[in-house]
């Protein structure tokens, strides 16, 4: 604790040091929890105010707060910001030369630091751990904690070693923070960082000022143009594409159409990337057309729209990418075009990937959840938040489905058949198998399991729905929460509690009527 701070309580310090009047969301609870020595896992979207959750406790508790961050490029900015506030902060990473880092270590040892940002590979070095064993440590903050997830695209092997902090410093509180918060990643973070007993703060995932739109792809570029013309003349925004080639084409095309647009992807020369990024941050009406390489650490408050010309790989990426819109709290749009081609392409990429089977299955489920989102007929925000474990009691009134209700068909009987098929086959098979059973296919596996003897076998044979249409039905059932996917096992579909009233005929299920139109399944069915 720096002697200059005459008060130890969070609120006056918030005002005195940071100049803010109130805590946001659960900041106060989180800070209190850490100050009193508890461990925490904080799931909060980008821009939600995670930094304060460790910065303030680091000032209140005796000793230095040690912050692990993978984003070397951002450490300097963070530290400069803190220095301006009069906080004694420094960073240690590969950008420093020997003298510079020795100087920082000297200040650390002589207790002249409130906050130290460290790259993970540096932190886990033995001599560094030995150094910090000799001083008081206020807390460990593990930023971007999802980097510990082997299945995520930001995986950092050094993050896995961070569990050592708990072993060597069992009495120092740890706070892990991330903006990626699906349930599987949460579990992995807790397990790998030995945070099983940490209190989880999942907060503020709702971004009420962002309006979500999903359109069926017909001519994606023209659809995008129409959207931009309608809503975003003169605005800054980001257009995400899946491939570098498509990024460049789209940026050129937007320029031809009279918009100010620049490309951004990892294949561009470093200085070009840098110039385009800086322009985006500084200029008021520039569109960046980018691959997912663009975004980590971009903090521009007035991004008015984020458009996806291609389907993102998962809801986590989608939410993180769209979350870059409207950080200033003013209305912003998240627009997404999706079509069957995207699904096929992403599946192909997945099939060709060299990852192991378990990983592929997980990616497949993530993709399915993404598709489920696209096919929703109900409030998109409710579904998104539910995916991250947050509950929105009422439909939001600010997504396309709330504003312009979609045409649906009564899919109750089809849903009953699907659910019943899951149940009768023992809740352990994947969609393709289930569809084969419903359509009465004679596959060796079906014969082997004797599922051709079930009442559900062939029950959908004469409904006139194709395998793809049944897949859409299953996806919507997953999306709507009637069916869950056994992610930890072999990816079999299981009935969720919500399936019961449907099977009992107490609840109707409405499915979206997309092209190609799905005919109503008329024949009645006893589940
Ligand atoms: P995150 O790390 O979650 O992306 P930051 O910690 O960078 O978010 O905070 C985002 C912005 O919100 C910053 O400009 C920060 O100063 C501001 N902020 C954080 N907490 C508060 C608060 N209680 N009151 C006002 N502004 C805040
Ligand atoms: Zn809604």
Image (tube, rainbow, N blue to C red):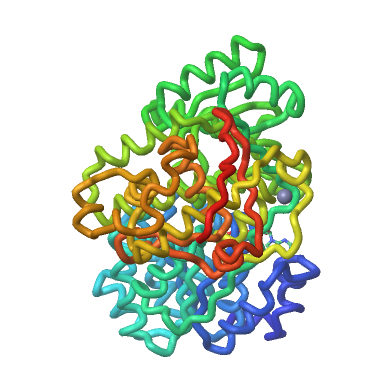
Q: Residue at x 41, y 60 (%)?
A: 422
Q: Is residue 434 left or right of residue 381?
A: left
- For residue 148, say whether it is visible: no
Q: Is residue 79 above or below residue 3?
A: above
Q: Is residue 363 above or below residue 185?
A: above
Of residue 439 and residue 270, the one placed in the foreground of this image is 439
Q: Is residue 329 left or right of residue 368?
A: right
Find residue 266 and report its horizontal and vertical position in percent: 39, 33
- For residue 445, say whether it is visible: yes
Q: Is residue 80 left or right of residue 117?
A: right
Find residue 150 and report its horizontal and vertical position in percent: 32, 59
Looking at this view, name the residue that lies furthest to the top.
256
Of residue 453 and residue 354, the one placed in the foreground of this image is 453
Quadrant in which residue 388 is drawn: bottom right
Q: Residue at x 76, y 78 (%)?
A: 12
State the quadrant of the N terminus. bottom right
Tally of numbered tags: 0
Q: Residue at x 41, y 21 (%)?
A: 245
Of residue 292 and residue 260, the one placed in the foreground of this image is 292
Q: Is residue 442 above or below residue 195?
A: above
State which image quarter holds ligand 1: bottom right
Q: Is residue 67 above or below residue 366?
A: below
Find residue 356 and report its horizontal and vertical position in percent: 22, 52
Find residue 365 and report its horizontal and vertical position in percent: 40, 52
Q: Residue at x 23, y 46 (%)?
A: 443
Of residue 250 and residue 508, the one placed in the foreground of this image is 508
């Amino acid at each position: 604790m720096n002697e200059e701070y005459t008060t130890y309580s969070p609120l006056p310090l918030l005002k005195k040091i940071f100049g803010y009047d109130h805590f946001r969301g659960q900041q106060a609870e989180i800070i209190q929890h850490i100050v009193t020595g508890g461990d925490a896992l904080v799931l909060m979207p980008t821009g939600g105010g995670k930094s304060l959750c460790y910065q303030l406790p680091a000032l209140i508790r005796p000793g230095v707060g040690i912050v692990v961050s993978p984003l070397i490029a951002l450490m300097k900015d963070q530290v400069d910001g803190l220095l301006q506030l009069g906080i004694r902060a420094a960073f240690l990473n590969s950008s420093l030369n020997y003298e510079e880092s020795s100087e920082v270590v000297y200040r650390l040892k002589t207790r002249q630091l409130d906050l130290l940002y460290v790259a993970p590979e540096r932190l886990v070095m033995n001599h560094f751990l030995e150094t910090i064993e000799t001083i008081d440590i206020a807390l460990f903050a593990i930023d971007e904690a999802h980097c510990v997830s082997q299945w995520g695209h930001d995986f950092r092997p050094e993050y896995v070693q961070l569990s050592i902090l708990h072993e060597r410093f069992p009495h120092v509180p740890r706070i892990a923070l991330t903006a990626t918060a699906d349930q599987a990643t949460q579990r992995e973070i807790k397990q790998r960082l030995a945070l099983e007993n940490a209190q989880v703060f999942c907060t503020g995932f709702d971004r009420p000022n962002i309006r979500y739109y999903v359109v069926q792809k017909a001519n994606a570029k023209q659809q995008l143009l129409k959207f931009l013309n309608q809503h975003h003349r003169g605005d800054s925004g980001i257009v995400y594409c899946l491939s570098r080639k498509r990024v460049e084409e789209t940026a050129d095309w937007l320029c031809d159409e009279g918009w100010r647009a620049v490309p951004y992807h990892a294949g561009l020369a470093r200085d070009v990337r840098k110039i385009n990024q800086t322009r985006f941050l500084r200029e008021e009406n520039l569109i960046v057309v980018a691959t997912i390489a663009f975004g980590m650490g971009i903090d521009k408050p007035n991004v008015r729209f984020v458009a996806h010309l291609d389907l993102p790989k998962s809801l986590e990426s989608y939410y993180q990418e769209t979350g870059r819109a409207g950080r200033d709290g003013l209305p912003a749009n998240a627009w997404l075009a999706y079509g069957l081609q995207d699904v096929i392409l992403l599946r192909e990429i997945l099939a060709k990937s060299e990852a192991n089977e378990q990983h592929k299955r997980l990616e497949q489920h993530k993709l399915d959840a993404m598709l489920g989102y696209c096919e929703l007929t109900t409030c998109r925000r409710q579904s998104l938040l539910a995916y991250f474990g947050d509950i929105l009691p009422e439909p939001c009134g600010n997504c396309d489905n709330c504003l312009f209700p979609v045409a649906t068909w009564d899919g109750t009987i089809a849903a009953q058949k699907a659910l019943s098929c899951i149940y009768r086959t023992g809740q352990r098979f994947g969609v393709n198998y289930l569809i084969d059973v419903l359509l009465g296919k004679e596959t060796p596996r079906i014969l082997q399991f004797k599922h051709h003897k079930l009442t559900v076998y062939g029950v959908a044979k004469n409904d006139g729905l194709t395998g793809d249409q049944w897949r859409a039905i299953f996806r919507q059932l997953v999306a709507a929460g009637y069916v869950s996917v056994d992610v930890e096992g072999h990816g079999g579909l299981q009935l969720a509690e919500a399936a019961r009233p449907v099977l009992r005929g107490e609840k109707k299920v409405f499915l979206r009527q997309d092209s190609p139109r799905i005919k109503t399944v008329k024949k009645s069915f006893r589940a």
